[in-house]
Amino acid sequence: MPKIDMTLADLDSLFPPNFSEEQKAKAKTIFLKELALSAHTFYRGKTMTMPKAGIYGFNWFNVWYTPGVSMVSTSIRDNNDASFDLSNRGNLVAVVSDSTRVLGDGDCTPPGGLGVMEGKAFLMKYLGGVDAVALCMNSYNDKGAHDPDKIIDFVKMVEPSFGAINLEDISQPNCYKVLDTLREACDIPVWHDDAQGTGCVTAAGLMNALKVADKDIANVRIVMLGAGASNTTIARLIIQAGADPTRMSMFDSHGGLHTGRDDIKSDPAYYRKWELCQATNPEKIKDIETALQGADVLIALSRPGPDVVKQDWIRTMAEKPIVFACSNPVPEIYPFAAKAAGAYIVATGRGDFPNQVNNSIGFPGILKGALLVRARKITDEMALAAAYSIAHYAEKKGIGPERIMPTMDETEVFAEEATAVAMEAMNNGVARISLTRDEVYETTLHDIKEARAIMDLLMEKEFIKKPDIKLLEAAFKKAVDAVK
């Protein structure tokens, strides 16, 4: 039976000996979902609010609250930027969502996104030393439609309480307007992790995959399956990183994006997709099967698989083909199936396969770097600086077909990202204050280690109680029974 501290790889030895690789992969997905449900019930969520200042006697109540705190309020009144020093604002992120595009489950109603948003806050603290709060909001207008202006107004209203905003799980096309409007309207970074975060880590993974395959980003042919917020932003960032847009093609559920797609051109809400229609696929290829013939790279962020990407498509690709199948919770094709079809490098969004390309390796460090220099926004240049830092960190440690990315347990990568982002923020003129590379790196590393030490202490003292092993056993049994 499974143990509390075992990895997903350890589960392989517990499955029935006749289980195929596909059965094991399906069982692991079911196991994680069942365990998540029972563990969230056990803890009633996974985040809480704790003071970080002490009580050293009765008088400290008068310091932290009235009358002493009056001077804090008037100081911030006279200089709003003082809020970054006199409150937790400088290390606090709002994770904002209307829950209309939650993972692969679509519209989950406003409170349905809380599990993901709390998870985001959890990872920010543990991986980046950043405090965060989940804010799931109702974006319905009077006509019962999801209104992007509702999200925009909501973020503008809460802006004074936070140092940055992380947008999450907002459906397209609303996500484009929300991000682009708020990036300009707000005086703090507004970051869409599904778009910019996924774009950043995918660009990093692609850089290293191409190095391993000995291919030049300027010369490769790239095919992209899915044209949502993630892939459209990935396309924009990898073009900035040197990819030739005329050697790229993107496909949505209606076929190839190109200048003949009047359905996209006629809808102003899809302006980001139309930009790619104009920049890519000059041959107006209509189907992905044709586009993949001789292609070097496939980047899929479309819908959960496992048979969305076909093995026959991969067999027609160029020598040493690179396949990113990053839909969650199930990739468009399982890595073992892609490898059997000839893929040289395969990446997914999951941690139980090699080459996890997941935005969790990016946003904690990126937001930390932006917060430390009190950036007013996160530019594309800052996101690319983070991508290069991720790729370089992995390369220093050694890269190969089974390792193109760092993993989440490599703490220093988050400090490297934070430093790269902060330095680029200063170069871009969007930082309120200046810090040295060493100051950013050491502060980030200190805050991460402190967050983990606090968590370790809470676990040691059993303020965070260990879940009953029966939860794991029950989840494992359900998973095995479901795929027998």
Image (tube, rainbow, N blue to C red):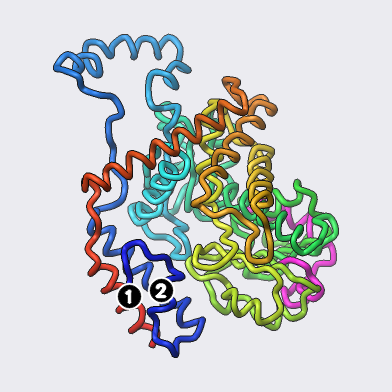
On the rendered structure, is 394 left or right of 439? right
Neighbour tally class for label 1: few under 14, some 14-19, many 20 plus, Cα within 10 Å = many
Circle 1: residue type: Phe
Looking at the figure, which quarter contains the N terminus?
A: bottom left
Residue found 51% across the figure and 55% down from its top: 171
Name the residue that disc number 1 marks: 476
Which label's residue is closer to the chain start, 1 or 2?
2
Residue 11, disc: 2
Circle 2: residue type: Leu
Residue found 78% across the figure and 55% down from its top: 278
Most extreme residue toward the left, as rendered?
Answer: 58
Nearer to us in this view, 286 or 428: 428
Quarter of the image for residue 453 reads: top left
Residue found 59% across the figure and 40% down from its top: 417
Looking at the figure, which quarter contains the C terminus?
A: bottom left
Nearer to us in this view, 294 or 104: 294
Residue stretch rendered in magenta on the structure = 270-297
Residue found 39% across the figure and 51% down from its top: 119
